[in-house]
Amino acid sequence: MSHFRRWLSDLLARRGTTAFLLAALILGVLVGVGGAILVWAIEFSHDAFGALDSALGWGKWFILLAIPIAFLISWGLDRQFGPGVASGGVTETMVGVGLHGGYLPTRLIPAKIIATAATLGAGGSGGREGPISLIGGAIGSSFSRYTGFGQDHVRSLVAAGAGAGIGASFNAPIAGMLFAMEVILRSFSVRHLNAIVITSVIAAVTTHFLIGEEQLLTSPPHELQDPRQLILYAALALVAVLFGVLFLRILAISSGFQLPWNLPGWLIPVVGGLAVAAIGLGEPLVLGTGQKFLSELLAATSDTKLVWGSLFVVAVLKIVATSLTRASGGSVGTFMAALFIGGSIGAGFATLVDPVWSLSEIDPGAFAVVGMAATFAAVARAPLTSVIIVFEITGDYGLVLPLMLGAALATYLGERLHTDSAYTIALTRAGIHLPTMQDIDLLDTVNVADVMADVDEAATLSMTVDEVLELFDRHHHHGLPVIEDDQLIGVVSLGDVEGVDDAGALTVADVMTRNPITVTPELPVSAALARMASFGLGRLPVVDDANPTLVVGMFRRESVVRAYHHALGTATGRELYRERVRLRSQPGAAFFEVSIVRASSLATQSVKDVPWPDGAILVSIRRETSVLIPHGNTRIEPGDKLTFFGTGAARVDVGHLMEPTDAPIGDWRTRE
């Protein structure tokens, strides 16, 4: 065993591809065990509350005591161990991956398990999938910090842990993988794929081995009875969107609830718990995860007696109960709640239309399956995850067309009716806007080390504000790192020192920002830019991977421009290669330049709106002393000089295209 530990330690220390994949495998086992522990903890909590119920003899009224106590436990743990304990968990994981380089505190793991077990064990409304996502992400973050991998690998492992938690909870590793990439990373970059796949599969196998089949959501196979039923499935998607948007709006409203008159905060879980318990007294099905009831709906056939009105009411009550549980400090996720709501409205919709649909037999279980996928797609904006997770739950591909149709329609309409998903509502309220990674994939190919600037000057704690202002003027910077004894202490910016009274007496220590946001050299520029944009910063210190107090450079706004130019040279080369070869093989192909006069019809137009000739490539735009790489949204301004590469015929076409509306052709010039 000692030889094995030494071999494993040496292998991880090399930090190569093999070591990274081995780390993903180990992480899968750890997350799988974490998922099983959460399930066992929920069972233990449920039994403990049941024993207390038997001792008191209150019967159904016991939930009026149990649920407020559980919410109070979760709320207290959140106050003690930090934000993220009393929440769904997915949003916090997204922030950790997107803004903090994959850092999630280890202390969240036991606190989240206890809070979730108390909430669901007592009857709080929601699911365990959001919490296990945060638990898996925190396990991945804690584990990766001890392996010495760079930040990009850490982000991969954290996302892998979060997705593996979802996969383990449903025994659906492919859905867990897609959830990690579609929701947590918001990117399908190939470099993350291997680790996420390995971790998700191993976690699902481990959890399934430890807890067995009975704890997982299951469904019999279903199939499309008649292609004409696609009309009904499309209508079901519309209904799912309405319920999904209602869920999102109530979540948004309830998340901003605050007590009036400066009442103590502990009243929130107590009052909210009583409200959820009151709903549960009227309809017990909405309490807990609702997994058993949902499994019954998925197994429903045309002979099953269902009442569509009751199912719709149950769906609405589930929306309210889950929103109140979240707003009251309960630790539950919206994943399972969305599936519960979708299954209810799917089965209810099938029961509603069955008397008037005479073309084929209606299968309520099949409509419940599609309703699950459509509602989750509308709530989470994760169409691929919603389709694949239903595939894996049912173990059958007979509903592939209705599932894809329902998920696509629900995602499209949901985005237009409610801009936020269930996981971004809290971020929008906090003023944080995580960029969509697909928008900046080009910058994924460049690391901070390639474009960071040298630390030409730094401030010290004893410097006065006047001295710092002089440094800003001398080096034309708006911010500097504060370094003392070769260690990063903070950052001082122009905003910190402008307008300060008695600037000659105050020192940097009085005005600087301590514990600044930093990046590392191996971090992709896309991630650094996301961090900079989310916090509204103009520069970030670049610190050593092994020593977070050692500054090795500065990442500034101009670094982003250099990174884009660097990436453009490599990323667009393949796309433009064939076109360049085709043009250069034609006689007369050359570079030429045209100027945009104020009277030109192209002035103030965007590049994408101009019908450029086929034989010409717009290479760059020179504006005063700057050279711009044109995009579709780049606006052409009077005075710009546009450089093209093209044939002689294309040059003539460009000349006609740029002819001014009120000026003679001689007002614009071309040159080789």
Image: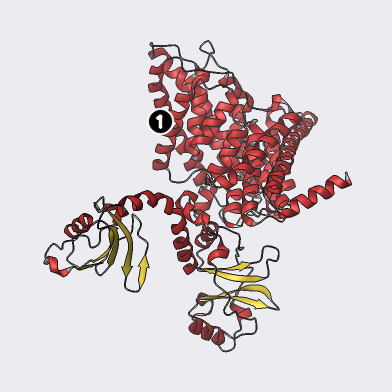
Residue 421 in the image: above or below residue 601 = above
Q: Quadrant of the C terminus?
A: bottom left
Mark 1 is surrounded, within 10 Å at the Cα level, by few (under 14), some (14 to 19) or many (20 or more) other residues, namely: many
Q: Answer whether residue 211 is visible to the viewer in this image.
A: yes
Residue furthest bottom as drawn: 504
Left or right for 484, reference 375 = right
Q: Answer whether residue 334 is visible to the viewer in this image.
A: no
Residue furthest right as drawn: 2
Residue at mark 1: 238
Q: Position of residue 616 (x, y in %)?
A: 27, 55
Q: Position of residue 307 (x, y in %)?
A: 50, 18
Q: Position of residue 213 (x, y in %)?
A: 70, 25
Left or right for 407, reference 30 = left
Left or right for 362, reference 3 = left
Q: Quadrant of the N terminus?
A: top right
Name the amino acid, label 1. Answer: Leu
Q: Position of residue 329 (x, y in %)?
A: 63, 46
Question: Looking at this view, is 629 or 540 the one in front?
Answer: 629
Q: Kindly identify the residue that appears in the image at 64 percent across and 71 percent down.
A: 551
Task: State the SS at label 1.
Answer: helix
Q: How many discs mark residues in the rendered view?
A: 1
Question: Looking at this view, is 40 or 289 the one in front?
Answer: 40
